[in-house]
Image (tube, helix red, strand yellow):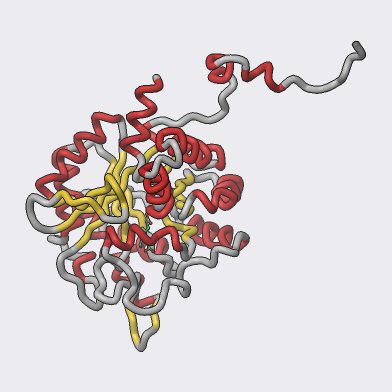
């Protein structure tokens, strides 16, 4: 038979162990950051209606939640506070007795090793649901910066290990860095939501955080999904302002951006696998349309492959369990 010339790629796929030898990317529980929604009140552990297996927990249920994560090898949580009272300027965001401050200090007291990341934004705390101060129907940039810096300082005082500002005002990293440094928190890093798109994939989260804007949308501060070079400008500003980590959000529809950011900046890159990406998989799996385990591990490894060092994900517990079963 005449010899055909071609490459035999299948040689390296011949067995499970052969595939394991040449595997280029890996998932570990240490890669995951688990978001937690803490509410005021007592004895509350209620499922978020649009996010199966995600719960609102009150402080008395919080330790159990963290214990479970420790047990699974997850090193880090991102804490979202859902306050009982909202007002025009989101004052519960920077109240030293606010729900998120209490949650942070409780976790650090009971689990000092757990890396606690504070989401730093105003939208859960404002009665209008926007991420900034409003005047005449406009979201004001600079007056919002002071409130963000105050929020970050109050979270650092409560013991937060990392501040994660998510509100997309210009200069937020500079303002928060300055605020933290002034109060002696120069060692607290900033994980900036540098590249955050105005996305329909946040729908279920707004249910969970009760943060749906009461008028308009977030398009004057969050990015247009059509844009790519703008993401580099956003990330560049945050790096110039001394951000320690860069978040790209959402993840799945934006893996090209994760790759762009990875290639241009030498700081840890975080992909935020957002609520809508989570709930779509949960809904399809509940209907028996997809295999949940396989599809979740595939989408998480795709984020690593795109260049993410870390992944914020509501799948963190399940994924850690599945990874352990595999090993
Ligand atoms: C708000 C914030 C949002 C998310 C985290 N912090 C979204 C928003 O703009 O409403 C989304 C997270 C998710 O969808 O999982 N500052």
Examine the image and state in which quarter residue 85 appears.
bottom left
Task: Tell whether 293 sits left or right of 93.
Answer: right
Q: Which quadrant: the C terminus? A: top left
Q: How far across and how far down the image is residue 243, in percent?
A: 44, 54
Q: Residue at position x 39%, y 83% from top? A: 138
Compared with residue 268, is residue 194 higher up or lower down, i.e. above or below? Answer: below
The quadrant where ligand 1 appears is: bottom left
Q: Which quadrant: the N terminus? A: top right
Q: How far across and how far down the image is residue 160, in percent?
A: 25, 49
Near-viewer residue (190 or 60): 60
Task: Tell whether 305 sits left or right of 246.
Answer: right
Q: Residue at position x 38%, y 61% from top? A: 203
Near-viewer residue (319 or 293): 293
Among all residues in the image, which is located at the extreme bottom?
Answer: 136
Near-viewer residue (289 or 27): 289
Residue 143 appears anywhere in the view:
yes
Q: How far across and how far down the image is residue 191, in percent?
A: 40, 51
Q: How far across and how far down the image is residue 308, in percent?
A: 50, 42
Examine the image and state in which quarter residue 218 appears.
bottom left
Q: How many marks?
A: 0
Residue 161 appears anywhere in the view:
no
Among all residues in the image, which is located at the extreme left?
Answer: 42
Compared with residue 3, is residue 66 higher up or lower down, i.e. above or below? Answer: below
Q: Residue at position x 40%, y 22% from top? A: 326
Q: Residue at position x 29%, y 44% from top? A: 77
């Amino acid at each position: 038979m005449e010899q055909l010339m071609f490459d035999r790629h299948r040689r390296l796929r011949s067995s499970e162990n052969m595939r394991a030898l040449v595997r280029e990317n890996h998932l570990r529980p240490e890669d995951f950051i688990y978001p937690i929604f803490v509410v005021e009140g007592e004895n509350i552990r209620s499922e978020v209606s649009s996010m199966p297996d995600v719960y609102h927990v009150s402080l008395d249920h919080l330790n159990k939640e963290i214990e479970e994560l420790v047990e699974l090898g997850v090193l880090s949580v991102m804490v979202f506070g859902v306050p009982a009272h909202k007002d025009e300027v989101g004052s519960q965001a920077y109240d030293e007795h606010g729900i998120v401050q209490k949650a942070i200090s409780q976790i650090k007291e009971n689990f000092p090793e757990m890396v606690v990341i504070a989401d730093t934004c105003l939208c859960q705390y404002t009665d209008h649901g926007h991420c900034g101060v409003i005047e005449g129907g406009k979201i004001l940039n600079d007056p919002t910066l002071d409130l963000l810096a105050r929020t970050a300082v109050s979270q650092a005082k409560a013991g937060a290990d990392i501040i994660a500002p998510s509100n997309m005002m210009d200069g937020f990293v500079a303002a928060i860095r300055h605020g933290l440094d002034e109060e002696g928190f120069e060692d607290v890093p900033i994980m900036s939501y540098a590249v955050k798109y105005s996305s329909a994939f946040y729908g279920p989260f707004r249910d969970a955080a009760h943060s749906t804007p009461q008028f308009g949308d977030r398009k004057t501060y969050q990015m247009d999904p059509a844009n790519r070079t703008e993401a580099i400008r956003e990330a560049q500003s945050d790096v110039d302002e001394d951000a320690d980590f860069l978040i790209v959000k959402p993840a799945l529809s934006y893996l090209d951006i994760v790759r762009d950011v990875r290639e241009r900046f030498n700081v840890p890159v975080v992909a935020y696998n957002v609520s809508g990406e989570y709930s779509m998989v949960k809904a399809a799996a509940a209907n028996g349309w997809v295999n949940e385990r396989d599809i979740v591990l595939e989408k998480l490894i795709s984020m690593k492959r795109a260049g993410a060092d870390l992944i914020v994900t509501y799948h963190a517990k399940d994924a850690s369990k599945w990874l352990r079963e595999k090993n």
